[in-house]
Amino acid sequence: MRAVWARRSLRTQLLSAFLLIEILAAIIGLCVIVTRARDAAGVEMSSSMRLAQLLASETVSLMAPDTTPERLLQILQQQLRYTRHAAVQVFDATGHLIGGKAPIKRHPGERSAPAWFSALVSPRTERIEHPVAVLGRNIGSVSIIGEPKDEIEEIWGHTKALAGLAFFANAIAAAVLYVMFGRILEPLTRVSAGLLTLEQRRYKIGIEQPDVRELAEIVNRFNGLAKSLHAAHRSNADLNRRLIEVQDEERRAIALELHDEFGPCLFGLKTNARSLAGACAKIGALSPGASEDSSKTLAEVEECSSVIVEIADRMQLTNRHLLNSLRPMALGHAPLEDVLADLAASFGRLYPAVSISLDAAGLEATYGDRIDLTIYRCIQESLTNAIRHAGASKIAVILHEETGRANESHAHGSRRLALEVRDSGKGMASDIRPGFGLSGMKGRVQALGGEWRLDASQAKGARILVTFPLDAPDIEHPSSEGEAAE
């Protein structure tokens, strides 16, 4: 019951507490009514019985002396016939019943009180036996029995009227309180919606200050918290963006050094080694009569030159891989679609058993250095994870522009660049935290105001969704992951 109670809204709990108090008040009121009604019915019954006894005595004393006993008993029975709250019976000297109490007359539509109410209100029944004597001779008796039925019915009628009035008044009070609680507690509903907005990482919000002082303080604190989170989010976003820019600049500088310095040096080394091998071969051809030691030395020099050429080839290959890892040299010089096609083809050459498809038609030549590089890194990291960790045999890469309706997270425009990478691998369990590659990818995307989402399951493989707002690349508030899926 405590769990059920905790799931109810504050308005329902307050209204339930009010109704519970009203029910307790009704029970207490019913107990008071029953107690007072029982006492009142007892007093009325006793009074009526004493009045009936006095009326019987007076009737006998006022009768003429020549009145016969039979006539006296009949007159006595008629005089006591309609006595309230008492049943009167007249008996002759032999114990024969002369008459009884007349039936109670009710108004049309009047109903008897329920049995349970009668049992609660009915007092203890009393009985009085009054002898009737004339000139010292006993001619009969009058039996007076308390009968509170008509009094109970009157009390029941008053109780029903009071209960109906109380129910109507409480129903109006409950309706008024329901409306008032709703208006008073409305700021808490707005605060709850605001907290959900903060959870979705949209911090630029504000709640209107209510008229209730305590709730106004809560709303003010919430607005202050939202402003602080907004400022911290902007600061973190700027810092993250700056860190990525610094990293990209360092990688660019290192790539240039590798390309401009190591590349020519390796090419020169390989060329000189080949020239040295060629020179040794010419010397051997021009000196047929050379000693065996000289021929052996020339052969060793020629073999060393070939080894140097092989090493230089491997260093050049490694240098190209390092260049592509640090920064693709074609990025920004060739169309983005061609650069991505070359990336997919290079993975296809390294992993021929994996089917990689790329759909990137209709793109612009470039979307700026930062977005182009981020798209490249996302695809590169996604392909690496799908092949090495998920064991995927099929990978599909889809990149296209889309235009959608503007919303809170895209207040400045609705033109977006959407990337989807899905594979047929084993996916990723929900209890496994993303590694540095996925975390870095997500941070890079969010630093550009984009949205990143990983949808992984053991049965359907994994899917990575990335979107960038093209009309406002520096948008401050990325939307929630649920909206990113759209």
Image: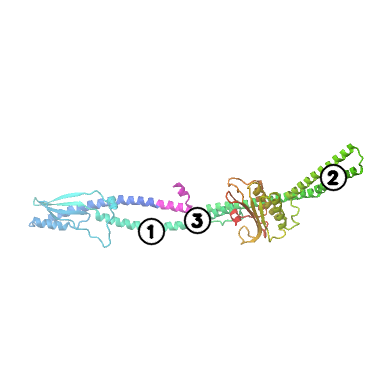
Residue 51 in the image: state x and y as whole percent: 20, 53
Residue wearing tag 2: 273
CA gap, disc 3 and disc 2: 88 Å
Please give the count of numbered marks on the rendered protein: 3
The residue nearer to you, when weighing 188 against 77, is 188
Pair 1/2: label in front: 2
Q: Are marks 3 and 2 in contact (CB under 8 Å)?
A: no
> As shown in the figure, which amino acid type bears the numbered disc 1?
Phe
Q: Determine the secondary structure under disc 2.
A: helix
Residue wearing tag 3: 184
CA gap, disc 3 and disc 1: 24 Å
Q: Are marks 3 and 1 in contact (CB under 8 Å)?
A: no
Pair 3/2: label in front: 2
Label 1 or label 2, whichever comes before in sequence order: 1
Range of residues picked out in magenta: 1-21
The residue nearer to you, when weighing 83 against 423, is 423
Residue 479 in the image: state x and y as whole percent: 61, 55
